[in-house]
Amino acid sequence: MSSRRRTVLTLIVLTLLSILSAFSLGGFRIVVPKRVTEGIGEVLSLPPPRFKGQTTVEEAIASRRSRREYSREPLELWELAQLLWAAQGITEPTLRFRAAPSAGATYPLEIYVEARAGGVKDLKAGIYHYDPENHNISLVKTGDFHAEIRAAALGQEWVGKSAVNLVICGVYERTTRRYGERGKIRYVHMEAGHVGENLYLQAEALGLATV
């Protein structure tokens, strides 16, 4: 088990699932396409995921906690890439299965990164969309939106202090086309939980603080 202090690096996971194809944060709005196939803006290739670490699954489960004290040290780009892969990355190259399970492989979730200035090395402040098929992120909007994210999260102060906020969006119709209403009220929300737990365990294995 890594002995690094949990406050060395930072992460916040914010789940917003009260929308179908868009979400609003304060005075700013992002439209989530039904199926994102192209970069929205500047595209940044991410370091490849790592499949071996210093922490076992059992150790990560045993030590997993919500941690609300953060350092000022930025995340490395490979650490952000590893978190995104754990959330929705491709784990089977032929059938394109992902790291988190999905009902009928409908994959209704879209992951966005909100990074503050200096929050991630070599990444400017802004909103980015994660493309699991190509393991890259595309710039949606430049700027620091921590205040808007915090407002959307009922003013929770640790959201405003994080280096990075991850926003999980659900496009319900991808799942309801196959499963009807139960896809909306059950499956999409369950999948957000699966992704959240993957992120918690990956953050714990990397020595990151998250809530």
Image (cartoon, helix red, strand yellow):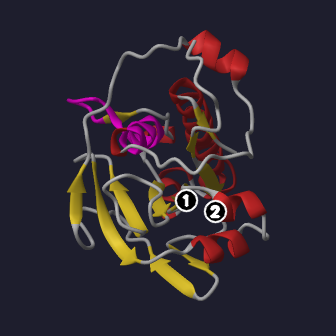
Quadrant position of the N terminus in the picture: top right
Expressed as whole percent of the image width and height from the top left, the position of residue 186 reads: 68, 48
In depth, the one of 105 and 19 nearer the eye is: 19
- Above or below, 143 against 118 in this view is below
Circles 1 and 2: CB atoms closer than 8 Å: yes
Residue annotated with mark 1 = 167
- Above or below, 58 against 110 in this view is above
Residue annotated with mark 2 = 16
- Asked whether residue 174 is in view, the answer is no
**Magenta-colored span:** 79-96
Q: Distance between the residues labelled 1 and 2?
A: 7 Å
Expressed as whole percent of the image width and height from the top left, the position of residue 115 reads: 47, 62
Residue 191 lies left or right of residue 107; in this view the side is right
Mark positioned earlier in the residue sequence (1 or 2): 2
Residue 152 lies left or right of residue 102; in this view the side is right
Instruction: State the residue at coordinates (67%, 65%).
Output: 160
Expressed as whole percent of the image width and height from the top left, the position of residue 207 reads: 56, 29
Instruction: State the residue at coordinates (79%, 69%).
Output: 154
Instruction: State the residue at coordinates (47%, 41%).
Output: 87
Give the crowd class for mark 2: few <14, some 14-19, many >=20 residues within 10 Å.
some
Local secondary structure at mark 2: loop
- Above or below, 89 against 93 in this view is below
Instruction: State the residue at coordinates (71%, 20%).
Output: 63
Expressed as whole percent of the image width and height from the top left, the position of residue 72 reads: 57, 51
Q: Which of marks 1 and 2 is in front?
A: 1
Displayed quadrant of residue 43: bottom left
Look at label 1 and name its amino acid. Val
Displayed quadrant of residue 147: bottom right
Q: Residue 78: within the magenta?
A: no
- Above or below, 158 against 107 in this view is below
